[in-house]
Image: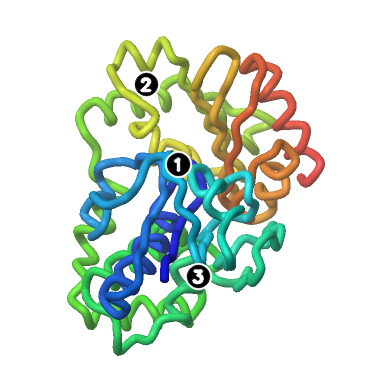
Amino acid sequence: KSVGIAGHIHPDGDCIGSSLSIYNYIKLNYKDVDVDVYLEDYPDKFHFIKGSDEITNNDKSDKVYDLFIAVDSSSLDRLGYGIKYFESAKKTICIDHHISNEYYADEVVLDAKASSACEVIFDLLDIDKINKDIAEALYLGMVTDSGVFKYEQTSRKTMEKAGRLLDFGVDTTAIIDGAFYEKTYRQNQIMGRILLESMLLMDGKCILGYCTKKLMDFYNVGKEDMDGVVDQLRLTKGTECAIFLYETGDLEFKVSLRSKRYVDVSKIAVHFGGGGHIRAAGFTMNGTMHDIVNNITEQIELQI
C-alpha cells in the first residue's frame, strides 16, 4: 500500500503541519505503508517539525499511489508538486477548511468553520495513537492559521483541541515565538524599511506596504524574510485592511491581504486567482505596482 500527501504552493504553518502530522501518524501506526510528502521548500523556522528532512521537493518520480491526500489546498492547481501524483492516484482525499474549496477529490473532508486544516485533521486522528511529534505538527497549524488564536475562526473547540495537544509536551512558547516573533537582524531591517515607507489609502481605511526586488537585494533578504510584514501592517490603529506586496519577477508581485472586521479578503483573492480565508488571503498578480494596488483597492471599496 502507498500513500502520497501534498499541500498548497508557498506552504505556510498549517500546510506544513497538516502534511507532516498525517505523514508522521502513518509512519508511527502503519509501518507497512509506503508514504511520501510533496511540498515546496519552506522557511527554516518550520524545520523543527519531524519529517521536514524527508519531504520531496520535486515531481520527478513515476510513482502511482493507492491513496493521495491533499491538505489545506482549496483547488488542484494549487497543489504544486503533488498535482501529477494526485491525478494518477487510485483514490484521492482532500482535507481542508477553505470555504472556497472546489471539491476536486473523490472524497472531501471540509470544515469551513475550523481555524485550520490541522484542526480538521485532529478530529480524524485517534488521539491515543499520536505522539509529541504529531502533536507539534498539529499545534503549529492551529496556532499559525488562527493568528495565535485571535482570528474569528477560533472557537472553544479550537482551544480545547489545542489544550489536548499540550498534554504531549508541546513547547508552545518556542513554536509561537519561532513562527511569529523571532526575526533575524536583516528581517528587522527590511520590515523597518517597509513600515517606514508604508502609506495610508482610502481615507486611512487601508494601509499599503511594498518591497521591490532591488530593496530585497540591498538588504540581502529573500521571500521567506517577508513573513510577518503584512500582520504588522494589519495592527495599524484605525485601519480595516492591510495590503502587502513584494516583487517576485518582472512585473510580478506576491500579494498578501489582511482585514479586521468587515472586508472578506478571500473573495478578493479568489477574484485575482488566489485564495485564503475571510481575514487573511493572498495571490500572485502581474502588472505594475500602481495598477495592482488600484485593482485591489477597487475590490476593497466594493465591500466598504
What kind of residue is marked 1? Answer: Asp
Nearer the observer, disc 3 or disc 2?
Answer: 3
What kind of residue is marked 3? Answer: Thr
Real-space CA distance between mark 1 and mark 2, rounded to the nearest whole angstrom: 38 Å
Query: How was this image coloured?
Result: rainbow
Residue highlighted by disc 1: 59
Asked if the residue at tag 2 contacts the one at tag 1, i.e. Cβ–Cβ closer than 8 Å, the answer is no
State the residue at coordinates (41%, 50%).
38
Residue 88, how many percent across, how many down? 58, 54
Residue 302, how many percent across, how many down? 81, 41
Nearer the observer, disc 1 or disc 2?
Answer: 1
State the quadrant of the C terminus: top right
User: Does residue 176 lie above or below 251 as drawn?
Assistant: below
What kind of residue is marked 2? Answer: Arg
Real-space CA distance between mark 3 and mark 1, rounded to the nearest whole angstrom: 35 Å
State the residue at coordinates (28%, 24%).
189
State the residue at coordinates (52%, 43%).
80
* Residue 144 visible within the image: yes
* Residue 116 visible within the image: no
Nearer the observer, disc 3 or disc 1?
Answer: 1
State the quadrant of the N terminus: bottom left
Q: Observer-nearest residue: 46 or 218? A: 46
Residue highlighted by disc 3: 154
Give the image quarter of residue 168.
bottom left
Residue 257, how many percent across, how many down? 58, 41
> How would you rate the neighbour count of disc 3 (Cα within 10 Å): few for under 14, some for 14-19, many for 20 or more?
many
Residue highlighted by disc 2: 193
